[in-house]
Image (cartoon, rainbow, N blue to C red):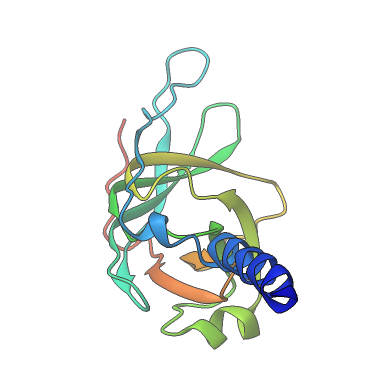
Amino acid sequence: MKKWKIVIPVVVIGLVVAWYEFRPERIVVNKSVNEALPVSTGGAAPQPVETGTFHSVFHPTEGTATIYHEGDGSRLLRLTSFKTSNGPDVHIYMVAAADAVDSPSVLQAGYIDLGVMKGNIGDQNYALGPDVDLTKYRSVSVWCKRFSYNFGTAPLNSDHLVTQK
């Protein structure tokens, strides 16, 4: 009888810790966002500089990543028509590689963490600090920090952009 008084609390604590680590409900729960492209002071539209299309790595990922210069000199990363899997502790990374076709390539190349993914579905914006050198950071990764997995990557290029006037 005394064994059960120890075993049951240990099992319950183990289940709570496992749930917290894996957050299995996030696999089936989607979070949608719909942020507008910000308009700079003076009403000038931000100008696209770089763009890329997501390809899947560890989870199905789709959509477009575009870097914009705003009228005040700041820059932002905008994800449009974006869709990926949800998960625990998923972040958006700028990666210092032309492409990241697996998880180790993100870690080996180096990255800048832009923050927690706002939602796994929808249009969203992430501010780029002045430390983000676009000649070095050439791709965007959807990265699960908890398990060190690259969900998907968008290699950036400026070849097909038409700037708006």
What residue do we see at 42% from left, 62% from top?
A: 24
Position in image of residue 19 (x %, y %): 53, 62
What residue do we see at 63% from left, 69% from top?
A: 8
Reply above or below: 132 against 129. below
Instruction: Indicate left or right for 108 with 120 as reference.
Output: right
Position in image of residue 123 (x %, y %): 33, 40
Position in image of residue 42 (x %, y %): 49, 12
Position in image of residue 144 (x %, y %): 52, 67
What residue do we see at 66% from left, 75% from top?
A: 110
Residue nearest the viewer, comparing 51 with 34: 34
Instruction: Indicate left or right for 88 with 26 as reference.
Output: right
Residue nearest the viewer, comparing 87 with 45: 87
What residue do we see at 47% from left, 43% from top?
A: 118
Q: How many marks?
A: 0
Reply above or below: 81 against 146. above
The C terminus - image quarter: top left
Task: Find the residue positioned furthest to the front.
Answer: 1
The N terminus - image quarter: bottom right
Residue nearest the viewer, comparing 50 with 111: 111
Can residue 140 be seen?
no
Hey, which quadrant is residue 73 in on the image?
top right
